[in-house]
Every structure is written in C-alpha cells, then in structure tokens.
Image (cartoon, helix red, strand yellow):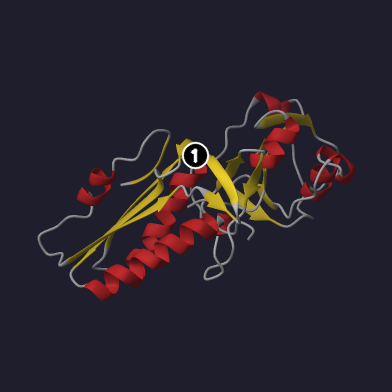
Amino acid sequence: MICRFFDRIEGDPPVTGMDGEQGHVRVRVFAALRERAGSSELVVPVVPGETVGALYARLFPAEGGPVLPVAFVRNRAQVGADAAIEAGDEVAFLPPVGGG
Amino acid sequence: MLAVVDGAIDVAAVRAAVDAAGHGAILVFEGVARDTFEGRRVLRLEYEAWAEVAEPVLQAIAAESGERWPDARVAVVHRTGVVAIGEPSLVIAVGAPHRPEAFDACRFVLEAVKDRLPVWKKEIYEDGSAWKANAPAGQGG
C-alpha cells in the first residue's frame, strides 16, 4: 500500500536555504531505499527540467536493486512522478509503509 | 497524546490520556512484536519513521476520528528502533461514553495508522531480514 496522506498534511515546511540557492535538492529516503543509498538524506544537484520520477530513476536505477512502488513527496505534499523539481525543494521517496 | 517515540511505550500513560469520568468504555490496543512470520522465526523488529511528518499524520488521523466519533477521545503512540518479541510497537487507546464508538474509532485509527503513517518495519530473522509492507485492511499483515 502506497502512502497517501500528504495531500492533507499541513505540517512544518521543509527547511530550505543555501542549498536551494546553489541549485540543490534535499532527498529523504527510508527503509530499503535508505539502506541502498547509505544515508537517510541526500543533497543532489538539480538537473533542469527533471521530474521527481526521473530523479528517482537516476538515484535508484533498476539495475542497482529492487524497484519499489514508492510514493513521491515534494515539499511535504504527495505528487505524481511527472512533478517538476526546483532548487531548494525537499523530495522524499516513500516505500510502502509498515507501521503497526 | 499522539507521538512517535524511540523507547518503550508507557501503556498506562496512553490509557490515562483518554480517561474521563464520562467514558463508559476504554479500549487499549497493543500491536505487539510476534515471534514468527510464515514459519520463519523472528528475532526482533526494527522500526524507522519519518518522525517530523509522522506526528502531523497522527494528528490528522485523530482529527478524522474526531469528526466521525466526536465523543471518542483517541491517543496513539508508535515506537521506533528495536522492538523485542512480546513488546508493543503501537499502542492505541480510545475512551468513549459507550462501546460502539470506542470499537469503531479504535479500528478506524488502527487501520489508518497501518495505511498512512510513514513508518517502516524490518523483520530480523535467524537467517536474514526483510522490510515488511502492510497489507490492505482485512488481509492480514
């Protein structure tokens, strides 16, 4: 089951600042993706015109591990794979959740 | 009380958070680490959360419960980190004037937590480990 609550969340906005001005995005990853990335947070340069789906494919290519049905979250709101990324954004890739 | 915590859950405190003189029903649900999964022996569970988002999600779930069952008071605590077999990873307490809304609100909150809370579970076996996603409601998990 893909997480699907972020359209209703009004939490604190993500922290942005110098990284944005320098053309980077913060990427938050969890569970199997965190283990694959080796870190829970990545700071990566923005590629002009890149979508969140393309960023996911760039950071987690299919040949490097299992492809998970992740939910895409941009600035704390769930978005589709075709959502555009801008410098300073926070992007999160959420594997299927397992709380309880 | 709507929280994601790193240590053991104080079950009595979760219950106390929904106690009220007008409540004729108090339910406490504990989701507990089980020692087997499909025949494999589970040694322990490890949970991680997107902590700064998980608590707003709990608040949203509690607010939805409050809209549907205005007289039911809800408390939810989810644990992160290593959880030993037999220990609770999730505690939900619901207090209400009568049992129907208590059971209904508790089930609603439980299923919403399993569906939406940004928490991930790793089962550690004798011979490996696996990240486990929740199944849709009514299909185990």
Residue B13 vertical position relative to residue B104 in the rendered view, above or below: above
Q: Residue at x 56, y 69 (%)?
A: B139
The percent coordinates of residue B49 (x first, y second) are 53, 41
- Residue sitting at 71 percent across and 52 percent down? A70
Q: Give the side of residue B93 with respect to residue B50, left or right.
A: left
Mark 1, secondary structure of its residue: helix
The reply, left or right, for residue A56 in relation to residue B137 is: right
Q: Between B61 and B34, which is closer to the camera in this rendering?
A: B34
- State the image coordinates of residue A73 (x, y, percent, origin top left): 65, 49
- Looking at this view, is A19 or A98 the one in front? A98
Q: Quadrant of the N terminus of chain A?
A: bottom right
Check the residue under mark 1 and report the chain it is in. B
Judging by the rendered image, the residue that carries numbered circle 1 is B52
Q: Residues within 10 Å of mark 1 (few under 14, many from 20)?
A: few
- Which of these two is toward me, B41 or B51? B41
Q: Amino acid at mark 1?
A: Glu
